Image: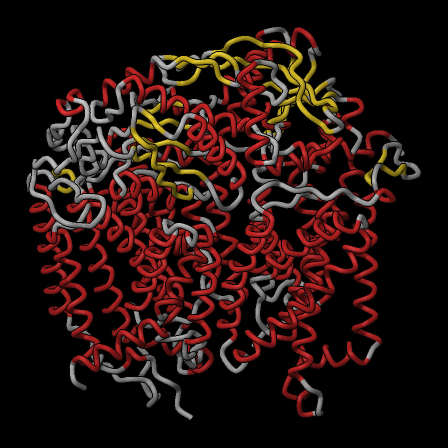
C-alpha cells in the first residue's frame, strides 16, 4: 500500500473498531426498546457494572475469556430479577414511568460500583493471545490485535443476531412482538415471560459490551452516563428497535466520530450532536426505524 | 380561532383571568417586589449569624458568649470584629463570620474535596494526606483541636460552590482547604475572598488563581500549570530533541500546560511541529495517533490526567508509537494514581513534577513509609499536597497561637511558613501566595518490579511569574 | 370514552388555593424571620430552580413534550445575564432582559427544528441541541470562559441599589418567581393553554379540529425557554459565575426529576420537586455516613416516587405521593 494511504487505512480500521464497540453497546438498548417500548436509561450503568465485574473476575480467575463469558450471564440474571420485581408492575402504566424508574436505577447502580470499587482509574489487560500488534498484509504498520478482536466480535454478533431474528422461531416471536404485542399475546404466547427474557438479554448484552470495552478503554466513575449518551445517539440515529438500525447507526456514528476527532479534535462533540440533529430532522424515525404512532 | 365544537374541551369562561385582572395582579406583584427589595436593601447590615448549633437569632453587635479563654492575648482580640458595612464592590457579601471570637475551642476547618464521581480518588488521597499529618502531631493546631467539616466537591461547579457557601455561612468554618477542580476554585474564589476566609488550596492548578484572580486570603500549596510544564520545555530543547508534537486535553489546564511548555521549548530553539487538542474527556485517542506519526517528531509532549492519561498512554503504546517517538509530558500523565492502570505501557516515559514517590530526602522517606503503614497503598502527589496543606495550617496557627480572628496576622504568619516538605524546601511566594516548587525530571522505570517514577534530574526551583 | 381532563381544567379546589396562598405568604415573610443567611441562600436557590422546573412543566405536564434539553436555555440565559453584568451593566432589569432575549431566541430556533418530532425523537433532538449549546459554551472561551466558566459576575443592582445582601436578592428572586408563576398560570388557564392540553391528550384530534398544532407547540416551547432563561439570569447573579455544566444534559435530567417528583401538570408540583431535590442534595450530602451515598439515596427515593405515584392518562404521573399527601392533609385541615 502506498505510504500516503496508510493513515487513511488506519483511520478506517479505527472507525470500524469503534463502530463495532458502539454496536455491541447499543444493540441491547435497541432491543429493549423495540419490544418493551421504553428506553432503559440504566443501560450505561449495566455497561459499567459489566466492565468492573469483568475486571474482578479476570483478576480472580486469571482468565479474560472466563470473564467475557461469565459476566454477561451473571448480569443478565440480575436484570431478570430486576425486571420481575421492579418493572413488571409498571407495564400497565405509561412508558415514561418505566423510563424514569430506570433513571433512578442508574443512579443506584452507579453508586454501587463506587461503593465496591472506589474512585481509582482501573485498567484491564487484554488476554495474552490478543495483546500486541498484528501486522496486516499490505499495511506496513502494526494494528493492535485487541481492536481487531473487537471488530470480529461485533461482526460475529451482528451475524448471529440476524440469524436468530430471521431464521428462528424465537426471532419470529420477537419480531412479531415488536410489531404487535397484543396479537402475539392473543396467539397464546406468554408475553410477560418474553419481555423478561428480552430485558435480561438486553442487559446481559450491555454487560458484555462493558467487558469487551474494558481493555479498549479504562474503567472509571462516570463512564456509565457517557456510554448511555453514546448508545442513545446511535440508537436514535439508526432507528429505535431495529437491529439493522443499531448496526448502521453505529457505523455512521463511529465513522463520523473517528474522522471528526482526526479532523477537528476539539469539536468532536459538536460533530456528533449536529449529525444526530441532521438525521432526526430529515428522518424523524432514524435511518431504519419505523415511525411510531 | 377555530370554533370550540368538542364538548370535551372546556369553554372559554372557565377560570381565565380578565385582562384587567391580570394587569392588576402584575402591578401589585411588581410594586411589592420593588418595595420589598428596596426595603431590604436599605436596612442596616444583617444581624450576626446564629450560633452554629441551632438557628437561634442573636442581637446585633453582641459578642457571643465565649468560654473562659486561657490566654489573655486571645482575650484581647476576642472582641467581635466590627460589622462590615455594605461591601464596596457589588459582589455578593456574606454575613460576617468574624463576629464570633474564634480563638478558643476546636478549630473548625472546612474541607471541600471530591468524594464522588471522576475525581474521587484525588479527594481521598488529599484528605488522607491531611489526616496523616494531623494525627502525626496530635491533631492540634495553635493549641486547638482540629475539627474537620467536609463536603463533597463532586465535579459540577454549581453545587460545589453552594457547599462552600454552606461551609462559610452555616458551619462558620474558620479556615478553608481543598478544591481539586480549577473551575470550582474560580467559582468559589469570590465567596472566600469576600468572607475573608483564609484558604489553603490543595490542588486546583489553574494559573489565574494566583495571578489575575489572586487574593490575599487564598494560598496554594500545590502548583500552577505553568510551574510544572515550563521547566521541561527548556530541558527537552537542550537535551532531547528539537522536533516535538504537543498534544493536550482540550480544557483550561491542558491548554495552560501546553502553552507553558511551548513557550520555554521554543525559547530554547525547539520547533513545535504540530499541536493537537483532543476533546476532554476522551476514551479513544487512536484517531489522533496517525497524525502524530505523520508529523514525524522525535518526541511528544502530552498533558492528560486521570483516565484520559491511562487511555492515551496505553493506546500510544498499543499502536507502537512509543518505540519510535519518545513519550514525555506533564507529571500528571505518569503519576502514581494512573501508573498501576498504565502498567508497562508507561515505561520509559519522561515527565516533570514537583514530587516523585522515590524522591530521596528524609522527609519523603518518612512520609512514604508512614503513609504505606497507615493506608496500605501507595501515595501520590495529591497525598503529598494534602500532607503539606495540613502542615501549612498547623505552622501558621502555631505562630498566631490559634487566633483566627486577626486575619492580617494570620495571613502574614502563613506567608512566612517555611519547612522541609517531602517535595523538598517549602515556601510561599509572598507576592502571589503560590508555593515555590522544586521541579524534578522523572522517568518511569521498574521499581521493585513495578513501573514507578525515578528522579533523574532537578530542573530548578520555580516560582510562578504571577502575571 | 371522554378524554381525561387535566386537573387545571376545573376551577381549583378551595383547599389547594388556600394552601398555595399560604405558601406564597410564608415565602414572602421568610427573610424577616431572622433565619441564618445560609437558609436564605438555600431558599433563593430553590426559587431559581423552581422557576425553571415550572417552565419545564409547561412543556412536560401541559403540552406533553418531554424535553431533555431544557437546561440549555437555562444556561444560555445565565451566560447572557452574566456577560451583560460583566461587560455592560449589572442593573437587574437589563440582565433579565438580556437573558430573556437570548433564551427566547434560542428557544424559538431550536423549537422550530424540533417540535414536529414525536416522543422519543423529540427527546433526543432536544438533547442534541442542548449538547450543541454545551459544546459552544465549552469551546468559545473568548465569550464564555470555556471550561473554567464565567466567574466574578457582580450581583445585580436594582435602580442603583445593590442586591448584594442575601435577603434583598431573595426577595428579588421571589418576585421573579411569582411573576413566572403568574404568567404560567395565566397561560395555562387561557384557551391557548387548554389547546396545549388538548394537543397532549390527542394531537391528531386537535389537528382534525383545525388547530395548527405545530405553531402552538412552537409558541409553548419558546415561552418555556424564555422563562427558563429568566431563571438563568438569577442563577448567574446568585452564584456569581456560570459554568458549562449548567447547560449539560445531566442538569436537564435533574430538572426532569424535579418536575416528575413534584408532580408534572400542576405547576406547583415541579416547584415542590425542586425544593425536595435541592434540599436533599444540600443537606443529605452533609450527613455523616449517609452523605457519601447521596446518589444511591436519590436514586432510591426517585424510584420509590415513581412506583408509588398514580399515573395519569396523559403519560405523565400526576400528583405523586408528595403532593397527594400535602393536599390530603390540607383537605383534612380545612374540614372537607
- Is any part of residue A289 visible from this angle? no
Q: Is residue A163 left or right of residue A275?
A: right
Q: Is residue C185 left or right of residue C129?
A: left
Residue A263 appears in which quarter of the rendering?
Answer: top right
**Residue B417: percent from left, percent from top:** 37, 15
Up-down: is A14 above or below A37?
above
Q: Is residue C302 left or right of residue B140?
A: right
**Residue A291: percent from left, percent from top:** 60, 72
Up-down: is B260 above or below A125?
above
Q: Residue at x 63, y 34 (%)?
A: B338
**Residue C267: percent from left, percent from top:** 30, 68
**Viewer-side residue, C241 vs A123:** A123
Q: Residue at x 59, y 14 (%)?
A: B440
Where does the C terminus of chain A fall, quadrant-wise? bottom right
Residue A282 appears in which quarter of the rendering?
Answer: bottom right
Up-down: is C100 above or below B414?
below
**Residue B272: percent from left, percent from top:** 64, 17
Q: Residue at x 10, y 44 (%)?
A: B58
**Viewer-side residue, C215 vs C164:** C164
Q: Residue at x 59, y 52 (%)?
A: A116
Amino acid at each position: 500500500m502506498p505510504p500516503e494511504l496508510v493513515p487513511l487505512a488506519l483511520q478506517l480500521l479505527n472507525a470500524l473498531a469503534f463502530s463495532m464497540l458502539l454496536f455491541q453497546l447499543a444493540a441491547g438498548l435497541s432491543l429493549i426498546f423495540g419490544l418493551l417500548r421504553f428506553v432503559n436509561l440504566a443501560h450505561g450503568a449495566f455497561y459499567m457494572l459489566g466492565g468492573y465485574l469483568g475486571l474482578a473476575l479476570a483478576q480472580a480467575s486469571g482468565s479474560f475469556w472466563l470473564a467475557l463469558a461469565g459476566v454477561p450471564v451473571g448480569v443478565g440474571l440480575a436484570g431478570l430479577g430486576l425486571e420481575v420485581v421492579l418493572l413488571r408492575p409498571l407495564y400497565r402504566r405509561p412508558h415514561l414511568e418505566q423510563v424514569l424508574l430506570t433513571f433512578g436505577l442508574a443512579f443506584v447502580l452507579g453508586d454501587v460500583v463506587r461503593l465496591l470499587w472506589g474512585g481509582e482509574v482501573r485498567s484491564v489487560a487484554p488476554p495474552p493471545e490478543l495483546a500486541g500488534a498484528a501486522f496486516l498484509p499490505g499495511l506496513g504498520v502494526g494494528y493492535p490485535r485487541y481492536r481487531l478482536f473487537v471488530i470480529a466480535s461485533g461482526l460475529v454478533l451482528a451475524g448471529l443476531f440476524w440469524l436468530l431474528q430471521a431464521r428462528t422461531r424465537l426471532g419470529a416471536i420477537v419480531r412479531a412482538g415488536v410489531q404487535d404485542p397484543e396479537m402475539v399475546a392473543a396467539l397464546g404466547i406468554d408475553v410477560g415471560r418474553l419481555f423478561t427474557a428480552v430485558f435480561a438479554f438486553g442487559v446481559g448484552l450491555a454487560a458484555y459490551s462493558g467487558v469487551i470495552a474494558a481493555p479498549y478503554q479504562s474503567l472509571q466513575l462516570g463512564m456509565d452516563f457517557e456510554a448511555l449518551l453514546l448508545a442513545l445517539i446511535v440508537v436514535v440515529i439508526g432507528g429505535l428497535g431495529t437491529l439493522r438500525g443499531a448496526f448502521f447507526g453505529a457505523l455512521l456514528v463511529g465513522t463520523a466520530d473517528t474522522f471528526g476527532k482526526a479532523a477537528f479534535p476539539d469539536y468532536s462533540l459538536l460533530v456528533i450532536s449536529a449529525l444526530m440533529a441532521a438525521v432526526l430532522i430529515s428522518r424523524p424515525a432514524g435511518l431504519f426505524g419505523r415511525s411510531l404512532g | 380561532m377555530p370554533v370550540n365544537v368538542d364538548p370535551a374541551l372546556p369553554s372559554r369562561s372557565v377560570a381565565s383571568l380578565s385582562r384587567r385582572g391580570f394587569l392588576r395582579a402584575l402591578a401589585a406583584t411588581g410594586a411589592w417586589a420593588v418595595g420589598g427589595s428596596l426595603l431590604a436593601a436599605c436596612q442596616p447590615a444583617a444581624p450576626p449569624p446564629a450560633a452554629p448549633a441551632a438557628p437561634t437569632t442573636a442581637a446585633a453587635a453582641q459578642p457571643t458568649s465565649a468560654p473562659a479563654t486561657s490566654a489573655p492575648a486571645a482575650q484581647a482580640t476576642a472582641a467581635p470584629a466590627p460589622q462590615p458595612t455594605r461591601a464596596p464592590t457589588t459582589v455578593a457579601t456574606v454575613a460576617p463570620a468574624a463576629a464570633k471570637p474564634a480563638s478558643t475551642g476546636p478549630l473548625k476547618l472546612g474541607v471541600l474535596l471530591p468524594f464522588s464521581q471522576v475525581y474521587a480518588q484525588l479527594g481521598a488521597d488529599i484528605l488522607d494526606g491531611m489526616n496523616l499529618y494531623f494525627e502525626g502531631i496530635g491533631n492540634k493546631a495553635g493549641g486547638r483541636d482540629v475539627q474537620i467539616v467536609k463536603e463533597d466537591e463532586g465535579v459540577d461547579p454549581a453545587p460545589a460552590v453552594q457547599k462552600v457557601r454552606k461551609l462559610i455561612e452555616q458551619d462558620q468554618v474558620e479556615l478553608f482547604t481543598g478544591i481539586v477542580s480549577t473551575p470550582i476554585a474560580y467559582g468559589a474564589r469570590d465567596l472566600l475572598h469576600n468572607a475573608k476566609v483564609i484558604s489553603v488550596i490543595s490542588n486546583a492548578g489553574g494559573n489565574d488563581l494566583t495571578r489575575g484572580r489572586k487574593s490575599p486570603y487564598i494560598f496554594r500549596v500545590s502548583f500552577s500549570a505553568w510551574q510544572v510544564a515550563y521547566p521541561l520545555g527548556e530541558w527537552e530543547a537542550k537535551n532531547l530533541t528539537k522536533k516535538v508534537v504537543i498534544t493536550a486535553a482540550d480544557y483550561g489546564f491542558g491548554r495552560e500546560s501546553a502553552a507553558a511548555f511551548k513557550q520555554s521549548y521554543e525559547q530554547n530553539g525547539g520547533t513545535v511541529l504540530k499541536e493537537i487538542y483532543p476533546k476532554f474527556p476522551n476514551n479513544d485517542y487512536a484517531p489522533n495517533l496517525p497524525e502524530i506519526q505523520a508529523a514525524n517528531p522525535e518526541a511528544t509532549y502530552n498533558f492528560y490526567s486521570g483516565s484520559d492519561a491511562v487511555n492515551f498512554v496505553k493506546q500510544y503504546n498499543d499502536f507502537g508509537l512509543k518505540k519510535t517517538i519518545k513519550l514525555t509530558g506533564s507529571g500528571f500523565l505518569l503519576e502514581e494514581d494512573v501508573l498501576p492502570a498504565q502498567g508497562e505501557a508507561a515505561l520509559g516515559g519522561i515527565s516533570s513534577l514537583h514530587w516523585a514517590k522515590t524522591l530521596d530526602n528524609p522527609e519523603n522517606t518518612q512520609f512514604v513509609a508512614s503513609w504505606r503503614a497507615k493506608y496500605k497503598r501507595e501515595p501520590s502527589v495529591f497525598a503529598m499536597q494534602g500532607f503539606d496543606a495540613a502542615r501549612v495550617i498547623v505552622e501558621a496557627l502555631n505562630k498566631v497561637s490559634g487566633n483566627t480572628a486577626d486575619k492580617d496576622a494570620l495571613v502574614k504568619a502563613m506567608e512566612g511558613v517555611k519547612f522541609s516538605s517531602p517535595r523538598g524546601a517549602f515556601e510561599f511566594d509572598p507576592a502571589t501566595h503560590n508555593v515555590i516548587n522544586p521541579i524534578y525530571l522523572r522517568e518511569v522505570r521498574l521499581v521493585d518490579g513495578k513501573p514507578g517514577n525515578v528522579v533523574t534530574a532537578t530542573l530548578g526551583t520555580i516560582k510562578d511569574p504571577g502575571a | 370514552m371522554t378524554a381525561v381532563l387535566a386537573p387545571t381544567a376545573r376551577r381549583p379546589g378551595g383547599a389547594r388555593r388556600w394552601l398555595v396562598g399560604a405558601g406564597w405568604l410564608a415565602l414572602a415573610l421568610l427573610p424577616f424571620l431572622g433565619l441564618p443567611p445560609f437558609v436564605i441562600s438555600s431558599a433563593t436557590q430553590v426559587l431559581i430552580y423552581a422557576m425553571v422546573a415550572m417552565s419545564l412543566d409547561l412543556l412536560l405536564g401541559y403540552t406533553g413534550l418531554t424535553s431533555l434539553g431544557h437546561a440549555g436555555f437555562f444556561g444560555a440565559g445565565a451566560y447572557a445575564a452574566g456577560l451583560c453584568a460583566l461587560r455592560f451593566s449589572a442593573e437587574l432589569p437589563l440582565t433579565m432582559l438580556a437573558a430573556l432575549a437570548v433564551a427566547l431566541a434560542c428557544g424559538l430556533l431550536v423549537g422550530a427544528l424540533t417540535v414536529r418530532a414525536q416522543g422519543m425523537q423529540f427527546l433526543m433532538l432536544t438533547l442534541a441541541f442542548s449538547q450543541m449549546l454545551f459544546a459552544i459554551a465549552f469551546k468559545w472561551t473568548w465569550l464564555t470562559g470555556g471550561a473554567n466558566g464565567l466567574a466574578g459576575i457582580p450581583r445585580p443592582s436594582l435602580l442603583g441599589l445593590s442586591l448584594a445582601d442575601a435577603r434583598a436578592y431573595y426577595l428579588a428572586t421571589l418576585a421573579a418567581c411569582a411573576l413566572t408563576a403568574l404568567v404560567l398560570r395565566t397561560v395555562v388557564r387561557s384557551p391557548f393553554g387548554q389547546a396545549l392540553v388538548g394537543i397532549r391528550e390527542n394531537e391528531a384530534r386537535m389537528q382534525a379540529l383545525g388547530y395548527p398544532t405545530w405553531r402552538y407547540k412552537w409558541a409553548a416551547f419558546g415561552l418555556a425557554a424564555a422563562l427558563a432563561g429568566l431563571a438563568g439570569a438569577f442563577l448567574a447573579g446568585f452564584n456569581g459565575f456560570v459554568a458549562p455544566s449548567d447547560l449539560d444534559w445531566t442538569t436537564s435530567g435533574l430538572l426532569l426529576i424535579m418536575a416528575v417528583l413534584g408532580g408534572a401538570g400542576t405547576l406547583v408540583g415541579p416547584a415542590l420537586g425542586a425544593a425536595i431535590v435541592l434540599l436533599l442534595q444540600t443537606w443529605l450530602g452533609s450527613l455523616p455516613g449517609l452523605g457519601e451515598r447521596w446518589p444511591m439515596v436519590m436514586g432510591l427515593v426517585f424510584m420509590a416516587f415513581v412506583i408509588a405515584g398514580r399515573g395519569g392518562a396523559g403519560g405523565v404521573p400526576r400528583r405523586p405521593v408528595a403532593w397527594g399527601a400535602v393536599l390530603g392533609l390540607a383537605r383534612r385541615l380545612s374540614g372537607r
